[in-house]
Amino acid sequence: MEDSKLPLALRSNLLDLFGQIEREFENLYIENLELRREIESLNERLTGDGQAVEGGDPTKGALKTKASHSTSQLSQKLKTTYKASTSKIVSSFKATTGSRALCQLLKEYVGHRDGIWDLSVTRTQPVVLGTASADHSALLWSIETGKCLLRYAGHAGSVNSIKFHPTEQMALTASGDQTAHIWRYMVQLPAPQPPPDVSAPCDEDQDSSDREEGEVDGEGPCEVPTVRVATATLKSHQGVVIAADWLVGGRQVVTASWDRAANLYEVETSELVHTLTGHDQELTHCCTHPTQRLVVTSSRDTTFRLWDFRDPSIHSVNVFQGHTDTVTSAVFTVGDNVVSGSDDRTVKVWDLKNMRSPIATIRTDSAVNRISVSANQKIIALPHDNRQVRLFDMSGVRLARLPRSNRMGHRRMVCCTAWNEENQSCNLFTCGFDRQAIGWNINIPALLQEK
């Protein structure tokens, strides 16, 4: 531990916690030894009694009943003692406000040949799910049936993000081929199927280690209509285009690149309007405000920047330095907040009116990837490198963790989350490097009731 870079106070706290865990297990071990001795003693007595009455004693049946009853009581005592003891240990790892809200598996979307970096839901009818993959393609899916409806194959590199136009059937994809594409789509939804009867508590801790990493159920990419030519190609970057988004109204788009710049384009002419420079390292994400001409960009330089285009004559920028490692994403909420996530294992909530310091900080046990915030309830969905997906409210209170077991959940890093809300029905979509996207039906009223 001499080479540890952890602060002394944190190390002391960790050592104290591990000491408590060790003592708990020691007590369990001693109790189990004592219970084993009791079982052995009881078995010896039962065996002795059985030999004494051998030979047709009329009390033999009564003895069997008594022995069975005694053994049953002892077995129950063992289970109760074990559960009571282990619950003390397990409880120390759970949030005090942990939820038991119900999460229902909606559908799994399997068809990509490589990891899925990003996903998004259309904002117009028909409502479909879009996924962007390292296999150089973007796929559109029927949310209800899980059927692949359309494939976009116009990029020559990994497709790193996908976003849909606010009012038209157009998609915007960013790629490792140093371009962003705008392309049109037409899809017809298949007939809906009955929902699967699969549900589990949101804090399920089972692992999925019995399945091989990278193993995906189902077949390869489905044979579906394919679009190969973009309506517009945006070519001004000198490096990987890692993300892109539509500005409010859909007449302009912003792109973020590993060339350390973000670009603003006119959709109709594909003309480059502004180049947004200032980040010291590669950009990781960009996001636009749903109702105002605001853009936020995040970077490996540990900062995110807020770009203001509300006044055509003034393009102001503010730099925020709240993280200590790569800022993997920063997103707007419907209100006046920005939520940023980082490889430093924290998520911070900021007030746009006063962004000198965060109004809430969420600390996690794994790096945080592309986050999303539900529009109606403002619930933050955090995808992690350790395959977990956790839900928090805007004040930083943990609400739930999505199931991850042998039956459901991701088997590798979770890259992105996206919400789709309709009335009381709320769907959350997640995607990961296990080549699949998963849809979840989140019981929002139950989630908030146990808050």
Image: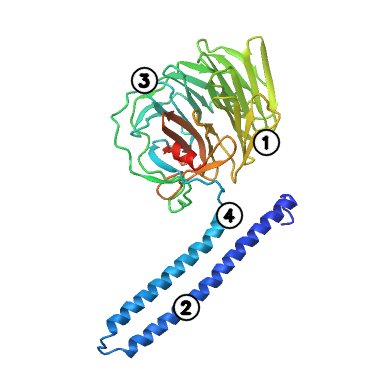
Pointer 4: residues within 10 angstroms few (<14), some, or many (20+)?
A: few
For residue 398, which numbered disc appears in the image? none
Task: State which tag comes first along the sequence, 1 or 4.
Answer: 4
What residue is shown with label 1? 323
What residue is shown with label 3? 186
Q: The disc labelled 4 sits on which kind of residue?
A: Ser
Residue in view at x 49 percent, y 20 percent: 181
Marks 4/2: CA distance? 30 Å
What residue is shown with label 2? 38
Task: State which tag comes first along the sequence, 4 or 3.
Answer: 4
Residue in view at x 62 percent, y 15 percent: 309
Q: Determine the secondary structure under disc 1.
A: loop
Task: State which tag comes first along the sequence, 3 or 2.
Answer: 2
State the image coordinates of residue 169 (x, y, percent, origin top left): 41, 18
Pointer 2: residues within 10 angstroms few (<14), some, or many (20+)?
A: few
Marks 1/4: CA distance? 27 Å
